Image: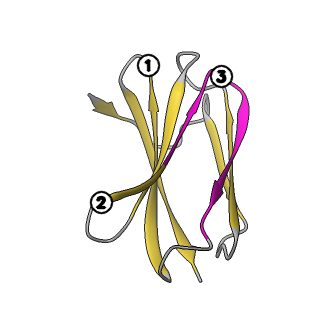
Amino acid sequence: METIPNSSSTELSLYPNPARDVLIVDVENIVGEQFTVSLINARGAVVSTSNTADANATTRLYVSQQAPGIYLVRIEAENGKVITKTVMIR
């Protein structure tokens, strides 16, 4: 597995940040067509997951049931590429 930063070829936007009810995950030009979006809490537990079959996709994660804090959003493409970014949930 290779972790890559949010590079110029892959655009990853998270909004609103901080999120209260819904977190929008907007991905463009990810390497590979299918990918998984995971929301990971400070303890390292995956608290929400969404699978997408489009390399240019917008995914909604419903976060209103999550405890306030800093979370990690992890995008994993079918070819093993991983992109991570932090988000705050209130």
Measured as percent of width and height from the top left, residue 29 is found at 66, 25
Identify residue for label 2.
Answer: 45
- Quarter of the image for residue 43 reads bottom left
Segment colored magenta:
49-63
Of residues 68 and 79, which is closer to you in this image? 68
- Secondary structure of residue under mark 2: loop
Q: What element carries label 1?
A: loop
Indicate left or right for 31 with 29 as reference. left
In space, the residues marked 3 and 2 are separated at their CA atoms by 26 Å
Q: Is residue 58 left or right of residue 71?
A: right
Q: Residue type at mark 1: give it.
A: Glu
Which residue corresponds to mark 3? Answer: 55
For badge 3, the amino acid type reads Ala
**Nearest to N terminus: mark 3 or mark 2:** 2
Q: Which amino acid, mark 2?
A: Ala
Q: Mark 1 points at which residue?
A: 78
| Marker disc for residue 59 | none
Query: Which residue occupies 30% across, 30% down?
Result: 2
Mark 3 lies on a secondary structure that is loop
Q: Nearer the viewer, residue 64 or 68?
A: 64
Q: Distance between the residues labelled 2 and 1?
A: 21 Å
Q: Magenta span has 50?
A: yes
The quadrant in which the C terminus is found is bottom right
Q: Name the residue nearer the viewer: 44 or 6.
A: 44
Which residue is pictured at 65% across the width and 22% down the height? 55
- Residue beneath the point at 37% across and 67% down: 41
**Residue at image point 72% right, 32% down:** 57
The answer to whether residue 58 is magenta is: yes
Marks 3,2: beta carbons within 8 A: no
Which of the 4 image quarters holds residue 10? top right
Q: Residues within 10 Å of mark 1 (few under 14, many from 20)?
A: some
